[in-house]
Every structure is written in structure tokens, then in C-alpha cells.
Image (spheres, coloured by chain):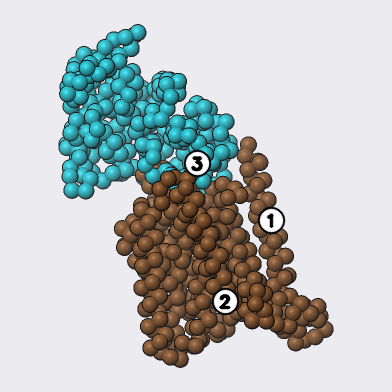
Amino acid sequence: MSDNNDTNAVPALEARRVSATLGMTEVLHDIDLKLSRARWTSIVGPNGAGKSTLLKALAGLLAHRGEVRLLGEAQGRVPARIRAQRLSWLGQSGTGEASADDLMVYDVAMLGRLPHQRWLAAPSAADREAVERALRSTQAWDWRDRPLGQLSGGERQRVLLGRALAVEAEVLLMDEPLANLDPPHQADWMQTARGLVAQGRTVVSVLHELPMALAADEMVVMDKGRVVHHGGCDDPVTHAALEQVFDHRIRVHRVAEQWIALPL
Amino acid sequence: MHTAHLRRVVLLGAALLVLGAALLVFGLGIGSTGFESLLAARHDPVALQIVWDIRLPRTLGAWLAGALLGLGGAVAQGLFRNPLADPYLLGSASGASLGVAVALMLFGGSVASTQWVMRIGLTGAAFIGAVLAVLLTLTLARGVQQTLRLLLAGVIVGVVLGAAKDLITIASADILQAIQGFILGSTGLVGWSACAVMAGACAICLLSAWALAPVLDGLALGEATARSLGLPLGAMRAALVVVLALATGAAVAQTGLIAFVGLAAPHLVRSVVKTTHARLILLSALMGGLLLMAADLLARWLIAPQELPVGVLTAVLGGSYLLWLMHRRSARSGVA
């Protein structure tokens, strides 16, 4: 770790022969994956490919076989609190956060600062600044005094996104962050992701919106619990893999300097 | 930032305290000898004794039991991420009363006893019963995810444990009388020692719940998110179950089964101000105290000079409130 290049050589996240079972069925089979630092990687694949499960395993939230290394250290050996400072995870909306309806937007975002706060300590000025930055970057700051339950689906998603950003972690894992967002806010989210990467942070997102996913630096294509392909988003081989997992029902085109995927 | 919100929280807390103090004065004046006792207390030793040894501990006891139940309700709703959770509906109150009945059967004595050993022993027995009942409910419900399943399991545990308690009381006739008033839920037997036990439990529960409140906030975002924030969920959940059981046990051992205060208090607080669990728990305790004290006054006054068991009154009022809540929830979400 003597110079910057060395640090960047250690992947942000590395999966070594990771397998996971949900109930009785194995949903991830022997996944080997290296996600480099300061890159935005999108994970795509058909429904049931194991994308969310992989993201959870990478975040250390799911029992699995094999090893996950976070910034070069074995995930299991990092204390939970330190891990929470380094890695922020945003789950799919609508999975379990319904009981947060009675929390204020500001308090929800402040939960992102828990890993940085001493137990029962009042939020520091740095915490408050981080929360304001995060909520402003998702345009949710104006609702800070409203309960989460009074917001629409898209507004809610922007608050939850703000919560994940407020951690200001080195690695951000987001599961379908664009769900319920309208096109302008999807574009905002992309800028946010780009901004984070420019600061040297690592962003990993499960995305169903293929044009958005193709705007990332790298793409992990999954199918049936395996990583089928991992490569640059501009690489024709990646496009071919993408078309392959969707049964050639889509085709990747270059339109207005962007990659888009159109149904056939 | 956030000052308007904080002001609402403080205002509500202050209002609940002031109303509580006002009702306490009323409580001192209500009884078979009426308000005159309060006025005569300064020169008449009998009147003084009535006010000081009967009315004051009883009124204060109603507040403390209500505070414990309100706190327990707020903890239960946060812990089980279920807005309809409450010490009574989760079966923990029935477990606590079974604990009391078992203790009485084994060691004799009376629920009305003012001896310290007795009060603390009964509270301990109620606490153990409450812990076991919550664990039983959780096992039956296989977790906390499904509202209906959890409530159904709680109701079943409540009925079964209640029946076990009935069997015990029938089998040992000497405690039948002692436990009678207690089954319906009554503050009539609360003396100073009971007050002290509840005050102690209330202090412990408030402090621990306050310390554990960030876990409840984190859990509100879902279990996975809470864990991603580095919260040690296992240990803290266990600690919260202990807090819930201690609050329920301490209240039930002194006043018997009093339903719905734990359910209603957090809802009423949330209808005024939405806030984090640390504040919600404190305000719910204040609200619960106020509710039960008010219900106790009503119970003493409605058919005076006789009195209603306060548990009957809270069951009628609280049950209607629960029905209304469920109706409103289903109307809002389109499903029951």
C-alpha cells in the first residue's frame, strides 16, 4: 500500500467461490468476481438470475459459502461497525422499510450516520452536513420535516437513496436504485454515481434499465445464479453476452452517443 | 434545523405531564368519602390517611402502570415492526399473570400484599412468565414478518396461558379470591410498595429503551438495512424483549390485566408528532400513564360509590379504538 497505484490494484470487492442458498435451492453457484475501485459497475440479468442475492452476499448480509473480500480484507473479519463505515447498501424499495412510514425524512437520512456515531452521542456537525449534502443531492432536502409515509414512491426512493449516500462509504451497493424514479431523477442519479466515482468511490448497482446500466464503466451479466460475463460497457463482447441472457429478444444500439437496448 | 419539530415534541411532553399532574389532584379527591377528605386532610388524621395511604398510591400507581404499558407498547411495535403489537396482544400480559398465579400457588400469599418480598417476588414471576409468553408467540408466528400471523399467535398464546391460569386458580381455592380482582385488572390494591416497584421498573425500562432506541429506528428500515448499518441485532433484540417483558411484568404483577393501553398510547403520540423511537418511547410512557390514570378516575367515578375494574373500562375503550385503527388501516391500504 505504498503508493496510489498499489491501493487501486486491490479490488473494492472480491468474491471467491461464493455460493448461497435460499431455502432449499442454491441461487448462487461458485461466483468469482473482482470489482475494481473507483469504478461504477452495473449488474444485469433476467429476473431470478441472482443479482440481488449476489449484492447481499457482497454486502455481508447473507450467509454464504466462499469468501468475500472488502477492500482487500476478508469480510467476516472486519467488525460490523467498520464494515458499515466502508460499505453502504441500499435494498430494493418496498422490501421491509414500510415500518419507517412514521419516521421523518431527516431522521431516516441520519440513520445513515449511525456507523460513524458513538452510541447515543448526538449527531455531530459533520453528521448534519453529510445528511444535508446527501438529501440535497437527491433533491429530498425540502421534505426533511415530513414523515416518510406521506411521500410518493419516487420521492420515497430519493430519501432512501439519500440515506445510503449519507453513510459516505467508500463502496456503495444499490439494488434497483432507479425504481419509481422519473427520467429527470434517473439522470440525476447517474450524475450522482458519476460524481462518487470521480471522488474515488466504488458504485455497484443492480439495474433493470439497460440503457442506464450500459452507461456504467463495467457490466456484470448474470444468468441462473452465475456470472456469465464481466467486461467494459463499451465492449461488443459485453453486448453480445447481454443479448444472449435475454434470449436475443433485445439488441444493443448506439444512439445519440449512448448505448441503448431495444426489444426485438 | 428541526427546531419546529423539536418544539412539538417538547410541547407534547409538557402537555402530557401537566395533564397528568392535574388528574393526579383529581385522583386524590375521588373516593367514597369524596373531595372533602382532601380538604380535611390538613387537620383530620383519618382523612389524611385516606388520601395519603389509599388515594395517592393508587392514583400514582395507575399512572406508573400505564407508563409501563405505554412504554412496552412502543417497544413492542418497534421491535416487531408491527403497529398493532402490544403487550396484551402478544400474549406477554397473559404470561405475566400466569407467572403471578403460579407464584401464588407455590408460595401462597395475596396479590394485595404490601410486603416488599412479596411485591418483588410477584414482579419477578410475572417477568419470567412474560418472557416465556413472548418467546412462545414468536415461535408460533415463525418470526415477526406477518402481522396477522403474529397477532393470531399472540391471541392463541393469550387464551391458552389464560386458561392455564384459570385452572391453577380453580385448583387452589385459597388464591381464587385473592386473584379475582386482579384478573379484571384493577388499581384498587396498589399501595406504596407496589408504586415503588413499578417506579423502579419504569426507570430501568426507560433508560434501557432509550439506549436501545437507535436499533428500533434502524429496524424500521428493514432488517437487512439495519444490519448493513452495523447494528448487532441479535443481542439488542434480546435486550429489547427483556425490556418489554419487564415493563409488562411489573405492570401486571401490581394491577392485573389491563388491555390496550400499550396499543393506544404510541398511536396517540404518533398522531400528534412523528419522531424517532427514543422520543416516541418516552412520550408513549407519558401518554400511557395519562390514559390509565384517566381511565382509573372514570372507573371510580362512573358508578360511584361502587367502582368498575379499570381493566374492563380500558378493554371497552381500547378495543373500540383498535377496531377503528384496523378499519382506517384497511381503508387506506385497500386490504385488511
Give the mark toward the camera: 1 or 3: 3
Between disc 2 and disc 1, the foreground one is 2
Choose between B65 and B122: the one closer to the eye. Answer: B65
What amino acid is labelled 1 in the image? Ala
Compared across the picture, whether B270 is left or right of B171 comes to: right
The chain painted cyan is: A
Residue B35: where, in percent of width, then height? 76, 77
Label ID, residue B309: 2
**Disc 1: host chain:** B
Task: Name the residue carrying label 3.
Answer: A149
Q: Circle 1 — which element?
A: helix
User: Dot 1 corresponds to which residue?
Assistant: B15
Question: Colour in which chain B is shown?
Answer: brown
Q: Please say if A212 is above or below B298.
A: above
Position of residue B137 relative to residue B310, above or below, is above
* Quarter location, residue A75: top left
